[in-house]
Amino acid sequence: MEIVNGYPCKNCTDVENAKKGIDPAKPKDGPNGVNAAETKKKAEEAKAAAKTAAEGPAERGPAVKFSGALAEVTPPDDAPKTQPYKPGEAFDIAA
């Protein structure tokens, strides 16, 4: 066994393919895998993703949807309401 250009080669045909940049395990993929089905599939997926990104953001629902016992839970009327943040109200630093 011999390693040529990072490819493990078992015979002289594998060595010749490796010298040309062809993976001896997948010779039909061509030099550097240009004819690989996976490469073509990834390129098509990238084009489709770019097209959907150009169309605009998708509509999104709530991040969490409760079900079961939590689906019908409502806060009590006397629950404290959240106050908006007011800068400097929490503490005062004097030099």
Image (cartoon, rainbow, N blue to C red):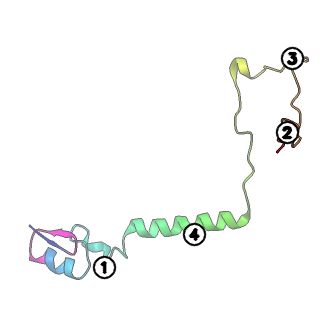
Which residue shows up at 90% across the image and 17% down it?
Answer: 78
Q: Gap between marks 4 and 2, in whole Å?
A: 55 Å
Residue 86 position, x and y percent, is 89, 41
Give the crowd class for mark 2: few <14, some 14-19, many >=20 residues within 10 Å: few
Which three-letter amino acid code belongs to the residue tagged 4? Lys
Which residue lies under the disc numbered 4? 47
Along the polypeptide, which appears first: circle 3 or circle 4?
4
Rendered position, 81 above or below 20:
above
Q: Report the disc number at residue 76.
A: 3
Residue 75 percent location from the top left of the image = 83, 20
Which is in the foreground here, disc 4 or disc 2? 2
Q: Seen in the image, is 47 located left or right of residue 14? A: right
Type of amino acid under label 2: Asp
Q: Quadrant of residue 19?
A: bottom left
Q: Position of residue 80 (x, y in %)?
A: 87, 23
Q: Residues within 10 Å of mark 1 (few under 14, many from 20)?
A: some
Picture disc at residue 55: none
Q: Is residue 45 magenta?
A: no
Instruction: Please tell me how crowded label 3 is: few (under 14), some (14-19), or many (20+) other residues with Cα within 10 Å.
Output: few
